[in-house]
Image: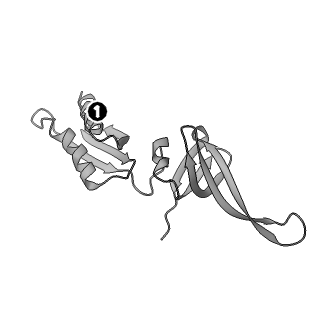
Amino acid sequence: MLKEKVQELLEKGLEEDSSLFLIDFTVTPDNKIKVIIDGDNGVTVNDCIKISRAIEHNLDREEQDFALEVASAGATAPLIMPRQYKKNIGRKLEVQTSDESYEGKLTQTNVECIVLEWKAREPKPVGKGKVTVQKRKEINFSDIKKAKVVLKF
């Protein structure tokens, strides 16, 4: 009952700002509500407050007590939805498929796949030594097991 009501309020709150979207939503048996959102342009504290208010102001604590947490997907959280990749174009990603692991700059994304590019050192085709080559890999969303942004400090 509470979960359905919260979901309805959450959807209404997200409709008010089309750049925001839901990543995860849970309600525990003891009525702890946790909402994780992301946005095409990132998520601000005000975005979290807006979604929190859309839910909290329409629930009656006299009817049912609850705890509510609205947060953004963290910088180190895995990318879950294809929509999250678009805002990360130009950033370095670590992507795991069932066969291999890739690390490279996200250069493109569309409804089906992403494109990673990176430089690698390989043996020269003729003679001794190594040469730097540009690598490019198209990876379908259906093949991605895990992907995350690689943060540089």
Q: Position of residue 20 (x, y in %)?
A: 34, 44
Front-most of 68 and 40?
40
Residue beneath the point at 53% across and 58% down = 90
- Which residue appears farthest toward the left when viewing the image? 62
Please tell me in which quadrant of the rendered image residue 14 appears: top left
Q: Is residue 61 visible?
A: yes
Report which residue position mark 1 lands on. Answer: 7
Residue 44 shown left or right of residue 75 in the figure:
left
- In terms of secondary structure, where does tag 1 sit? helix
- Which residue appears farthest toward the right when viewing the image? 127
Q: Position of residue 10 (x, y in %)?
A: 27, 36
Q: Residues within 10 Å of mark 1 (few under 14, many from 20)?
A: some
Q: Amino acid at mark 1?
A: Gln
Residue beneath the point at 55% across and 47% down = 146
Front-most of 108 and 59?
108
> Is the image coloured rainbow, by chain, by secondary structure, or in one colour?
one colour
Q: The N terminus lies in which quarter of the figure?
A: top left
Q: Position of residue 117 (x, y in %)?
A: 64, 56
Residue beneath the point at 59% across and 37% down = 142
Q: Is residue 81 visible?
A: no
Residue 3 vs 78, above or below: the answer is: above
Front-most of 50 and 7?
50
Residue 136 vs 28, above or below: the answer is: below
Image mark count: 1
Please tell me in which quadrant of the rendered image residue 31 appears: top left
Residue 21 vs 120, above or below: the answer is: above
Residue 49 shown left or right of residue 115 in the figure:
left
Front-most of 93 and 106?
106
Q: Position of residue 5 (x, y in %)?
A: 23, 30
